[in-house]
Image: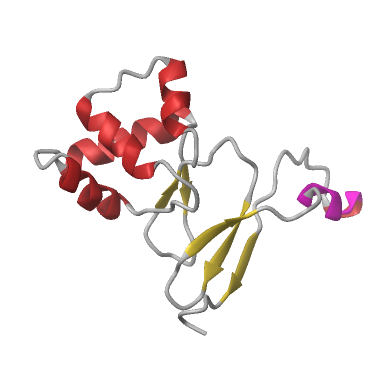
């Protein structure tokens, strides 16, 4: 499980019932939901939660750096709660399923100095693509 709720408590983020539900829906491993999916799951827990409230909460979580927006191949933005756990993504080219992966080694180490063009490289995002078992 991700530690999203604990991180939010530690930051003093006011956990209203609506915000708590959004955070609970996002909490976990391999969670990469769209805003509409977050809303649909939140409504099951708190029927009166509005779409605007979900979007606002997601925006705040991204601004806080507690959730990362993930986009792949022009598909809808997805929200990843594992913002503080270094990982890469494995994406199904068929259905768009996203899984977190933790390959060995530092992805920055494979970029030769000559290929950095003077950039002070601070990070790397690597996306592995293929077909999931259901699409293969």
> From which residue to which does the magenta span run?
107-113
Q: Is residue 66 above or below residue 123?
A: above
Residue in view at x 26 percent, y 36 percent: 21
Q: Is residue 117 magenta?
A: no
Q: How is the image coloured?
A: secondary structure
Query: Which quarter of the figure has residue 17?
Result: top left
Residue found farthest to the front:
1
Residue found farthest to the bottom:
136
Q: Is residue 108 magenta?
A: yes
Q: Is residue 72 above or below residue 11?
A: below
| Horizontal side of residue 89 vs 72, given as left or right | right
Q: For this rendering, which residue is in front, 16 or 74?
A: 16
Residue in view at x 44 percent, y 51 percent: 31
Q: Is residue 101 above or below residue 15?
A: below
Instruction: Point out residue 52 in the picture as x, y percentages from the top left corner.
Output: 19, 40
Q: Is residue 131 above or below residue 61?
A: below
Instruction: Point out residue 5 in the picture as x, y percentages from the top left corner.
Output: 41, 29
Residue in view at x 20 percent, y 36 percent: 53
Residue found farthest to the left:
48
Q: What is the magenta segment's predominant secondary structure?
A: helix
Instruction: Point out residue 2 in the picture as x, y percentages from the top left corner.
Output: 50, 39
Residue found farthest to the top:
12
């Amino acid at each position: 499980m991700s530690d999203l709720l604990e991180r939010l408590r530690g930051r003093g983020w006011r956990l209203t019932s609506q915000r708590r539900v959004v955070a609970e829906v996002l909490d976990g491993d391999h969670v990469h939901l769209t805003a509409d999916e977050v809303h649909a799951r939140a409504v099951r827990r708190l029927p009166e939660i509005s779409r605007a409230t979900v979007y606002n909460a997601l925006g705040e979580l991204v601004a806080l750096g507690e959730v990362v927006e993930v986009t792949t191949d022009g598909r809808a933005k997805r929200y990843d709660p594992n913002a503080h756990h270094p990982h890469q993504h494995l994406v199904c080219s068929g259905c768009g399923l996203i899984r977190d992966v933790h390959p060995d080694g530092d992805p920055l180490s494979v970029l030769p100095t000559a290929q950095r063009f003077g950039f002070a490289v601070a990070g790397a995002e690597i996306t592995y693509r293929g077909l999931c078992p259901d699409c293969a």
